[in-house]
Each structure stands twice: as C-alpha cells, then as structure tokens.
Amino acid sequence: MRILVTGATGYIGSRLVTALLSEGHEVVAATRNPKRLADFGWYDEVDGVALDAHDEDSVANAFAEAGPIDVIYYLVHGIGQPDFREADNRGAANVANAAKAAGVRRIVYLGGFVPEGDQLSEHLTSRAEVAHALNVEGGPDVVWLGAALIIGAGSTSFEMLRYVSDRFLLMPLPGWSSNPIDPISISDVLYYLVAAADGDRVPAGAYDIYGPETSSYADLLRAYARNAGKWRAELPVIGIDTSLVSKVTAAVLPVPGGLASDLVESLDHSMVASETGLRDLIPDPPGGLVGIDEAMRRALSSRSRTPVNQLTDPHHLADSDPPWAGGDTLRIRQLAEPFMPSFAQAALGLLEAVPGPVAAAVRTGLDTLADFVPKVTPA
C-alpha cells in the first residue's frame, strides 16, 4: 500500500516508518519541516511532504503532492503546548476532510485509553476528541488504537520513569501511583499499528492495545530500578495530587515541562484496557507480547544512539530521538566527548558509578552551559 505517516519525525512515527518499509509498503513521510527528514536513516527510502495539520492549505497541498494514498497514520498531537485541545481538534478535522476529498480508504489513529468518569485530564479528553474529529461522514474509515504507557528508550513516558528512578534515592509514592495501568512495549505498539492498516483483518472501530501484564506507576518505577540494578527507598505520601506533582515534575526532570505536566495529570485515573482489544482479532506477534521486565531490559541495554532504520531493537535509542532522552550519564557523555582528547574519553565509562543525584546535577550544569554556547549556522 501507499501510506502517509503524519508525525513521521516523532518517536512513534519514525519507528513506524521503518516497520512499514520493512513490510514492503511505500511511505510518504509528512512533517511541518521537511528539512528534518534528512536526519532520519530512512530518508532516501521515502517521499517527503510538508504538512501542517493546523493549516487547511498546507494539508491540501500535502495531499496534492503525495498523490494517491491508501492509508493515513495520524500521529499528530500538541500535548504540552498551550491550548493544545482546540489545535488538535482542528488539525484532525483538516486532515480527515482532505483525506475524504483525496479518496483515502482508512485513517489509523494512535491515541490513549479513555477511562470512565467526567473529570478527565486535558490530555485524555483531547485524545477522545481527536478520534471523533477524524470521523467525517462519507470519509475514510477510522481505526482508533488506544494505548497507555509505552515502554522504550526515547518514549516520553519511559524517560520520565527513568529520570524519577535515577534522580531520586528516596522515591515518593502518592496514593494515585498505585492506580492500575496496562503498559505496552514499543515493539508491540508497532506490531499492532502495522496490522491496523489491513481492513480485511481489522474492521473500523476503537480498540485498546496493551501488554501481557497489568501494573501500576509505582510498580513500574520498581521494575525500572530493579532492571537498572538500583536500590531505591520508598516514601508513601498522602494528600499530594497530580496537579502539584505535575508542576514539580516539570521543574526537576529534563523532559519538556508542559509535556511532562500534562502526562502526569493523566495518572490520576486507572489506565486499564477496555474489553474491546485488538488482541481478539490479531494473533500475538511471534514470540508473544513483550512483558514489562523484558521491555525494560531492552530499553536499558541501549548505550548509544543509532539511526532509527538501523536499530536492532525498537526499544533502543535512536539518534533522531529527543536530545533530552537517554538518561543523565549518556547526556553527559554527549556533551563532554567533543571537548575531550580521545585518550581521555575512556574515563567517561566511570560515569555509570556516579550516584544519580550527582549525575543529574552535572548534567543540568552542562545543559545550562551548552545553552550559552553560540550556535554557528553554516553559510
């Protein structure tokens, strides 16, 4: 099939492009800034188009340039940005209407679980609203896949787990951290996304995707620490709600503040899959779904950045993933290596023995210094 991937430069999108190419599909990679596509290892294997979902003219021009499209993957979101709900709804409607005019057969949308209740976070409410906006009368059929926390190096949710566990020797555990959650590995997300393009296997509709184990945020922190070989003391706390934690998280973790705070506020709800799951239609991948500990081990085994199309495992860190991802010691190495003679770089291996809070302080200082270094733009 000829497939257009919106959000192709994102964490999920960049890995999905690799998976689709490996299945023999033709891929059109859509992004607001096509120049960024050159940073991805699959650049020479795809067609690139400029597409800003929030601009009707941009969307129309993108479809005209892309030519006939069978399936669209809608992976656009503005979480972490001001007024993202309204912008996300408008972007989804623009793409859905343009897809209808272009004769696109199917839109596959990756969103989140929507728990029962009226007091949902902005993030969760927006995910449901986008799914509704993608459904237009007479337009493409829509497959909405809902996922909770995705485990893999570079995933925002996983990176937040990493930094909380690495940086805090005493882990505060509010009451809501015991809410049940159904996480899923990045490899299984990609498996289900690829399968969802096939209308013969997956009818239009909403499906939850999830791994083989139900956990909680507190248990995921424990799993990370266990697989990273760290001992962490726990501090149960009472009366601390997600709105306060979201502000603290945005201030102390190297994850973009708005993104981190919006995700934390979603943890106030149980994130358990509904009875409508894609597992009822699609057999498990060869070898079975990836469990929590195995997914953690794979993510933690990534010691360097690799082009996304050359990853031996999608759980590993790609060179196109956000620069803040990968942990404090990896970031210190990235910042320090260009200024160290080659004979001294071996000493950077000792960083693994540095206590987490110390590494965090050093990394924060280096990040601050890097912000003051003038950026030289090539002529």
Image: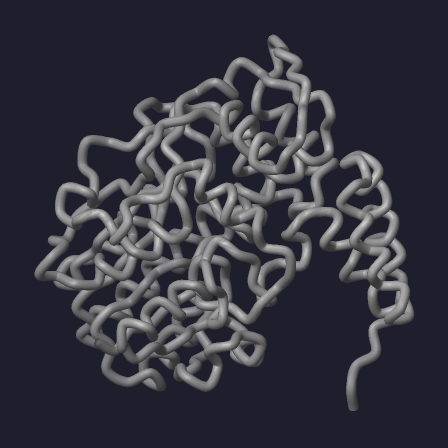
Q: Is residue 249 left or right of residue 299?
A: right
- Residue at the spot 26% in from the left edge and 49% down from the top edge: 144
Is 166 drawn above or below residue 189 in the view shown? above
Residue 317, picture quadrant: bottom right
Q: Position of residue 110 (x, y in %)?
A: 34, 51
Residue at image point 66% right, 43% down:
257
Q: Nearer the viewer, residue 108 or 333?
A: 333
x, y (%) of residue 239?
A: 60, 10
Indicate the quadrant containing the N terminus: top left, top right, bottom left or bottom right: bottom left
Q: In the displayed structure, does residue 244 sit left or right of residue 51?
A: right
Q: Is residue 123 above or below residue 47?
A: above
- Residue 248 position, x and y percent, is 70, 30
Residues 277 and 105: in front is: 277
Position of residue 260 relative to residue 37, above or below, is above
Nearest to the observer: residue 123 or residue 308: 308
Can residue 332 be seen in the rendering of this structure?
A: yes
**Residue at 54% in and 38% down:** 262
Residue farthest along the bottom direction in this orientation: 379
**Residue 360 visible from this viewpoint:** no
Name of the residue lying farthest toward the left: 200
For the rendered model, the colour scheme is one colour
Residue 185 in the figure: left or right of residue 64: right
* Quadrant (top left, top right, bottom left, bottom right) of the C terminus: bottom right
Left or right for 179, reference 363: left
Q: Position of residue 346 (x, y in %)?
A: 83, 61
Q: Residue at x 84, y 37 (%)?
A: 358
Q: Quadrant of residue 120?
A: top left
